[in-house]
Image: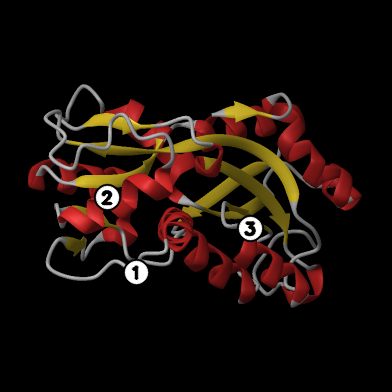
């Protein structure tokens, strides 16, 4: 993943938004709900460790798909959210559950599939065209199906393709809410195509047979955002 700023600065943005935190005792902590990808890639652990070193304040996190992470925040149970689905993030802020969207980092999505590429998408230039071909040929495709940021991004590409995926070939992984890593392992077992973030692929590439068959489409950029929760909505957070 590419960071827009150095690690410590990311959470220090949060401190700047809430100066009272600078005076917090060392036994205080920030509660974070985050999309699962940054946890699996190790980014969240790096950010939390650096933030504690620089401020003396610990960060505790819970991982969930973006929609679920935002639902946790809507209940006021966390101080800050890390998400990667612009449309639902904007709804969250518009409803005044969050104060603003702070750009944090980005990576990208890729489409993986069997090395023999039965759908023949490897020479295709756009993700939308690739998914359309997969649907036309009805080759197995695994989806998280859980309204996570990854799933919403996949649905956006299906929309661009003008195709509504359905049928036995379109396999909804029943444990998709557990994250991209389990979904990728399941797709590998099925030798199916799958839409996944590059960080998840890189963390598992030596353990799976699926290969990257489509990449570097601008439509596949994956922007990750930090959203401070509106203090008026908090019930269990540690800001005040």
The kind of secondary structure element at disc 3 is: helix
Residue at 41% of width from left, 44% of height from top? Answer: 127
Residue under label 1: 164
- The residues tagged by marks 3 and 1 sit, at their Cα atoms, a distance apart of 21 Å
Query: Does the CB distance between marks 3 and 1 fall below 8 Å?
Result: no
Q: Secondary structure at mark 2?
A: helix
Q: Residue at x 21, y 66 (%)?
A: 174
Camera-nearest residue between 102 and 122:
122
| Along the line of sight, the residue nearer the viewer: 30 or 147 | 147
Q: Residues within 10 Å of mark 3 (few under 14, many from 20)?
A: some
Cα distance between the residues tagged 3 and 2: 27 Å
Q: Earlier in the sequence, mark 3 or mark 1?
A: 3
Residue 240, horizontal then vertical, whole percent: 80, 63
Of pointers 1 and 2, the one earlier in the residue sequence: 2
Residue to which mark 2 is pinned: 133
Q: Which of labels 3 and 1 is toward the front? A: 1
Disc 2 residue crowd, few under 14, some 14–19, many 20+, Cα 10 Å: some
Dot in front, 1 or 2: 2
Please report contact status of discs 3 and 2: CB closer than 8 Å, yes or no: no
């Amino acid at each position: 993943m590419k960071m827009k700023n150095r690690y410590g600065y990311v959470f220090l943005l949060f401190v700047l938004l809430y100066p009272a935190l600078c005076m917090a005792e060392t036994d205080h902590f920030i509660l974070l709900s985050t999309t699962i990808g940054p946890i699996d890639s190790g980014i969240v652990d790096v950010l939390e460790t650096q933030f504690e070193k620089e401020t003396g304040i610990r960060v505790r996190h819970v991982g969930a798909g973006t929609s679920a992470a935002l639902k946790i925040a809507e209940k006021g149970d966390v101080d800050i959210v890390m998400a990667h689905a612009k449309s639902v993030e904007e709804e969250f802020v518009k409803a005044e559950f969050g104060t603003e969207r702070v750009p944090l980092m980005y990576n990208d999505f890729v489409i993986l599939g069997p090395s023999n590429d039965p759908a023949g998408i490897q020479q295709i230039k756009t993700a939308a065209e690739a998914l359309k071909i997969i649907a036309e040929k009805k080759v197995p495709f695994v989806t998280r199906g859980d309204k996570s940021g990854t799933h919403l991004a996949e649905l956006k590409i299906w929309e661009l393709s003008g195709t509504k995926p359905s049928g036995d070939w379109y396999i909804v992984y029943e444990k998709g809410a557990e994250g991209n890593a389990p979904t990728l392992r399941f797709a590998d077992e099925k030798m199916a195509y799958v839409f996944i973030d590059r960080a998840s692929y890189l963390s598992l590439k030596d353990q799976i047979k699926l290969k990257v068959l489509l990449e570097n489409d601008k439509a596949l950029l994956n922007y990750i955002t930090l959203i401070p929760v509106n203090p008026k909505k908090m019930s269990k957070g540690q800001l005040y």
